[in-house]
Image (cartoon, rainbow, N blue to C red):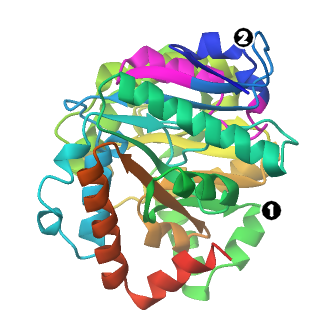
Amino acid sequence: MVPAVTSSVTDAVKLGYADLVEPDNLYDTPSWHEIDEAIGIAKPFTVLTLPEAGSARATAAAWGLIVGEDAFWPFLRADSVLSMFLEERGLPGADAPAGTLSGLMPSAYLGALRAGTTRLLLRPGLTGAPARQAIRELLDEAEEMARGAGLNSIGCLYLPTECELERDALIEAGYTEFGPALHVAIMPVTSFDEFLRAMKAHRRANVRRHRRLVAASGVTIGREPLTPSLSDEMLPLEAQLYQKYEHVSHPTEMARIVHAGVMRAHGERAIVVTARSPDGVLRGYSAFIHRGETLYSRDCGFDYPWQGRLPLYLETNYYSAVELAEEIGARQIHYSYGSDETKVEYGCELHPRMTYIKAFRPSLAAQLAELAGLVRDREPPAQAGRASSVRQ
């Protein structure tokens, strides 16, 4: 096999990248990578393996980013992701071997930027020894690129636990495993009635009460296509959400670029569930993209001072979303990560994601291995059982 590295996903498409993306996979599509390349959050690259020189039928590929020490988004930084993981496990970063976390940057990030899933893509139908070889050569080429760029580490930070072949290849290539680092929430959908029946009686009563409150307030719940004018209404509400959860600032211009890219690439499949007050003002929204049998939950935002205790988040993000999925024939809603307990209460299944990091300096690699051992020693028994069972 022959490795190849491109600086844009457009060039990777010419080598067969798009053929490796499954029909329901939104965040690994070339159109989505083009959006993430346009926002300029970090320097992109795509690594591929080809069956022979001159071929345009890649056997494996991974889009990624070169993440500098000044990168602001914590979920693509190896040091920040590991620090958050350690805190969750009761092992603060300060307890880690000196310099381990800061020494990981700058780093190469392998996989999609969005929604907590970083896959290594394989050509459909490729299995067994050829698949293992393609993934291993992909990892070797990515590492060579990262070392050549003067980076300190490389990571595949949110790999699905069911990707056994890829997980084994990462371990064999010298990556250290941590996790689960987070869980992606996915809600199976059949009908709104089934959504209610799956709940406990008190939860069903709450849903009905919430919907009565929204109706009594005069708020109109609607579905609108994403347009430039609607985007202008949405951005200030998303900024309020960022402020509520104590983000330093809202990346408004980046969000505007994302909305424009979504409009171009997805058109009428970009659907916004809106909540408008009687005067027509947008007071809350949850945005979705329909791809295949999956409805992807995207950004959301709310006018918190105006809504008070009105459950607009639950209405737009869950209740109306389930009705939307049922009507368009989507079989699941992909909710990304965060707020695990709430999502489980409303019918989501949690899918664990594992973190793999390889430090290039031998001393730093040894410290990572030591840190992984400390985590295993402190991991709660229930968590340890869940992590190990997905390997069986």
| Quadrant in which residue 90 is drawn | bottom left
Left or right: residue 196 versus residue 117 is right
Along the viewing direction, whichever of 358 and 69 lies nearer the viewer: 358
Determine whether label 2 and label 1 are within 8 Å by CB. Answer: no
Q: Nearer the viewer, mark 2 or mark 1?
A: 2
Along the viewing direction, whichever of 169 and 284 lies nearer the viewer: 169
Q: Amino acid at mark 2?
A: Lys
Q: Calculate the distance from the C-alpha at mark 2 to the C-alpha at mark 1.
A: 38 Å
Query: What's the residue at 38%, 58% (across, down)?
Result: 310
Task: Judge whether residue 32 is colored magenta.
Answer: yes
Q: Which residue is mark 1?
A: 190
User: x, y percentage for residue 184?
Assistant: 54, 58
- Furthest-bottom residue in view? 381
Magenta-colored span = 20-46
Q: Which residue is mark 2?
A: 14
Q: Amino acid at mark 1?
A: Thr
- Residue 217 image label: none
User: x, y percentage for residue 37?
Assistant: 46, 18
Asked which secondary structure carries label 2, the reply is loop
